[in-house]
Image (tube, rainbow, N blue to C red):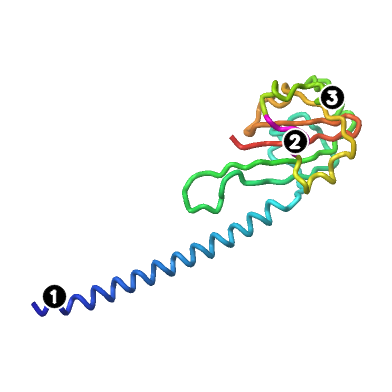
Amino acid sequence: MTTGRRARPAVLAAAAGLVLVLAGCNTAAVDETRGCQEQRQADEAKVRVSRWDPPEDLPHVGEYSEIHWQARALGDPCSRVPGPTDWEYQGVIVLRPQDAHRLAEQFAFVSFASIDPAELLHSHTPTDVRPDLVPFVPAKPRWLHSEIYNETLPSTRWRVAFLDLEHRTLLFMLNDH
């Protein structure tokens, strides 16, 4: 009987040690998640100017002179639950004049104002542009839209684009799928 009594303090000490280790792991996990969330917020606020990659996501835009874009996580990339996180991208591209005209003609862009939004295959409009990208959008744009362009292959992402021919500006919205 003395064996059981001597084992109890050792078992209790081991259990207490395990609780402390788990509490330490939990604190580390919370700190790691907090750091990840802060990094995600900083990344989402950043306006990028690097060329779009892969270019297949935005076909036929040519050698554009300027781009500004942002990425935003649709889920929680900091979650400890396994699985992918989908991303949404928005950007504004200044096209060369010949590329803007070729795009409009090749994909039958029409005035967005003449389209009934209920007939669109998506719910995006040019007013959905993110605040940090607004300075790169023309002051009084005349947006054109093309479902043909949106559905053009190849693309690894869903695409919605609006074109202002006068200002040679393409506003794009891409979502992972």
| Residue shown at the point (70%, 23%) measured from the top left | 118
**Marks 2 and 3 in Cβ contact (< 8 Å):** no
In depth, the one of 52 and 132 nearer the eye is 132
**Marks 3 and 1 in Cβ contact (< 8 Å):** no
Q: Earlier in the sequence, mark 2 or mark 3?
A: 3
The correct choice, above or below, for 97 with respect to 106 in the image is below
Q: Looking at the picture, which amino acid does disc 2 mark?
A: Phe
Q: CA distance from mark 3 to mark 1?
A: 86 Å
Q: Earlier in the sequence, mark 2 or mark 1?
A: 1
* Residues shaded magenta: 123-128
- Label 3 secondary element: helix
- Label 2 secondary element: strand
| Residue shown at the point (72%, 46%) measured from the top left | 70
Count of number-bearing discs: 3
Quarter of the image where one finds residue 113: top right
Residue 172's disc is: 2
Q: State which quarter of the image contains the N terminus.
A: bottom left
Q: CA distance from mark 2 to mark 1?
A: 71 Å
Residue 174 in picture, x, y percent from top left: 68, 36
Residue 4's disc is: 1
- Label 1 secondary element: helix
Is residue 125 rendered magenta in the image? yes
Residue at the farthest left position:
1
Q: Looking at the picture, which amino acid does disc 1 mark?
A: Gly
Q: CA distance from mark 2 to mark 3?
A: 17 Å
Residue 111 in picture, x, y percent from top left: 83, 23
Q: Earlier in the sequence, mark 3 or mark 1?
A: 1
| Residue shown at the point (85%, 31%) measured from the top left | 164
Q: Looking at the picture, which amino acid does disc 3 mark?
A: Arg
Quarter of the image where one finds residue 116: top right
The label nearer to you, 2 versus 3, is 2
